[in-house]
Amino acid sequence: MDRSVFRPIHTNACEVECSSCNLREICLPVGLTRLEMEYIDSRLVATRRKVARGAPLYQAGDRFESLYAVWTGFFKTAVNSQDGRSQVTGFQLGGELLGLDGIGSRRHEVDATALEDSQVCVIPFEALELLSAEVASLQLQLHRIMSREIVRNQGVMLLLGSMYAEERLAAFLLNLTNRLQARGFSASSVLLRMTREEIGSFLGLTLETVSRTFSKFQADGLLFVRNRQIRITDPVGLQQVLNGAAH
Amino acid sequence: MDRSVFRPIHTNACEVECSSCNLREICLPVGLTRLEMEYIDSRLVATRRKVARGAPLYQAGDRFESLYAVWTGFFKTAVNSQDGRSQVTGFQLGGELLGLDGIGSRRHEVDATALEDSQVCVIPFEALELLSAEVASLQLQLHRIMSREIVRNQGVMLLLGSMYAEERLAAFLLNLTNRLQARGFSASSVLLRMTREEIGSFLGLTLETVSRTFSKFQADGLLFVRNRQIRITDPVGLQQVLNGAAH
DNA sequence: CGCGAACTTGAGGCGTGTCAACCCCTGTGG
DNA sequence: CCACAGGGGTTGACACGCCTCAAGTTCGCG
């Protein structure tokens, strides 16, 4: 057996198993049988890695070797253009996969940064490819995740290309609360892990516009804001804003 | 042998081979050996389908069964929101793959429409998955294509989120001419296959702004426009516009 | 506890959207 | 051959949503 896969590449690495992970129902191995899950545990030596708040998980230009599944914490991804522009392209929470951008060129094309102290499962991609050729349901799941990422990005393109600031922020909040709810958190009370600037970058707005729009939502009785603590009091009203009720 | 795969599903279907296709160097089978290509020809029964100008290749909600490789012609893809908003998310030309949006949910999530009389290769996805589990270089290529689509979309997000109209149109033109050039067409003389409205939808602008920006580029000596016929006279200048020379 | 980062709010300017008029090109049918 | 219709494109005037710049406040981390 190749023991090199057991050598911790990063300081805080240890082996982990999908079959005993609390996120197995929303992470990569969704839809696998217990048997299949134990099989991939034995073949896919995933390790865990800690990433401190503010630290990069990887950066554009880094060699691509692994995908990363968020285990705990919260991440952002951002693209950078040659002339120094930057755009946040997504926020990732538990069970979501990072690193898909590197498969094409074997180098990462975006930056992935932890927004709070986080832990990820490191999934060596070569091993994943070998294994997905063997386990059909794993292959299915990998393709599904990549396809959904494509669809999600196209949804963001719709947002950026055709929505007003209020609609964008409403869409952002509803999407975030839906994902938090799917992980057992409250859908109404949210602690934002990102700055106004990061929200603005994601939504194609300035931080001032984000701040003003939060204030307007509060004045309209849709939610309470106090810095990063949000309490949504009227999700239906937010949905109406998203559907273009204002215009 | 299952003869059903030979039955033309659509009026103008016939079998085709990757190994003898003139696009094999820029399409799905890039990087496959001659032998591998002949093997997938024998196993992956792709048919060809004609799509008339203005007709849908597929629409959001359609059952997903196949990927499509553009053989001749030109397509656009567009997402629609519940409240009737629409956004063009890309334009596809020869050798590019359509339908990746359907893998995740087994239903197409976007509309794909021919912008001129076109032909596509129909690639049954089940068969492709089986085959890619067998042929590593095909698996590699499929993953590569999906990853690049993700990266491409993030590039569009950067464009939509942080660029001025002039920068967006410059980026659009340079991207289009690069892809045309890779297919052996002129990089300077372009016949646009889409309306100003479709360009605007893709770039998050109105058709009037697109039209005005074309006129400004012409006034600035970057190109000549006459309706859909474009001749780029100063690609370096266009690149400078993209890099934010104006601001 | 103190400092810097993050956030809020206001005033004014600018880029792009909106609305409208007009032109051009193409295809059709008398 | 011309008249006509209609979609696509251009251009102008004006409106408006968001950005920019600035000042002041609050928060949270070391």
Image: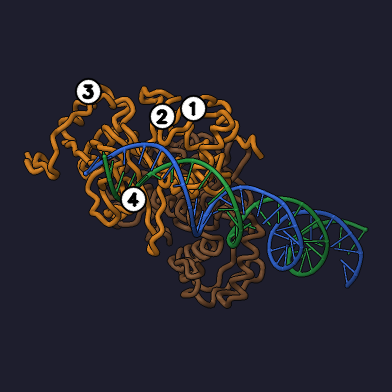
Chain colours: A orange, B brown, C green, D blue
Relative horizontal placement of residue B214, taking residue A25 as reference (left or right) = right
Residue receiving disc 2: A190
Callouts 1 and 2 close, C-beta under 8 Å: yes
Amino acid type at circle 3 is Leu
Relative horizontal placement of residue C14, taking residue A41 as reference (left or right) = right
Callouts 4 and 1 close, C-beta under 8 Å: no
Callouts 3 and 2 close, C-beta under 8 Å: no
Q: Nearer the viewer, residue B131 or A222?
A: A222
| Of labels 3 and 2, the one closer to you | 2
Q: Nearer the viewer, residue A168 or B212?
A: A168
Q: In which quadrant is the N terminus of chain B drawn?
A: top left
Q: CA distance from mark 4 to mark 1?
A: 40 Å
Residue receiving disc 1: A232
Residues at discs 4 and 1 both on one chain = no
Q: Which disc is residue B144 wearing?
A: 4
What's the residue at 66%, 67% (across, down)?
B227
- For marks 3 and 1, the one nearer the N-term is 3
> Which of the 4 quarters of the picture holds residue A243?
top right
Amino acid type at circle 2 is Val
* SS for callout 2: strand
Relative horizontal placement of residue A228, taking residue A161 as reference (left or right) = left
- Chain of the residue on which disc 3 is drawn: A
What's the residue at 35%, 43% (across, down)?
A76
Residue receiving disc 3: A35
Q: CA distance from mark 1 to mark 2?
A: 8 Å
* SS for callout 3: helix
Callouts 3 and 1 close, C-beta under 8 Å: no
- For marks 3 and 2, the one nearer the N-term is 3
Q: CA distance from mark 3 to mark 1?
A: 42 Å
Relative horizontal placement of residue A224, taking residue A106 as reference (left or right) = right
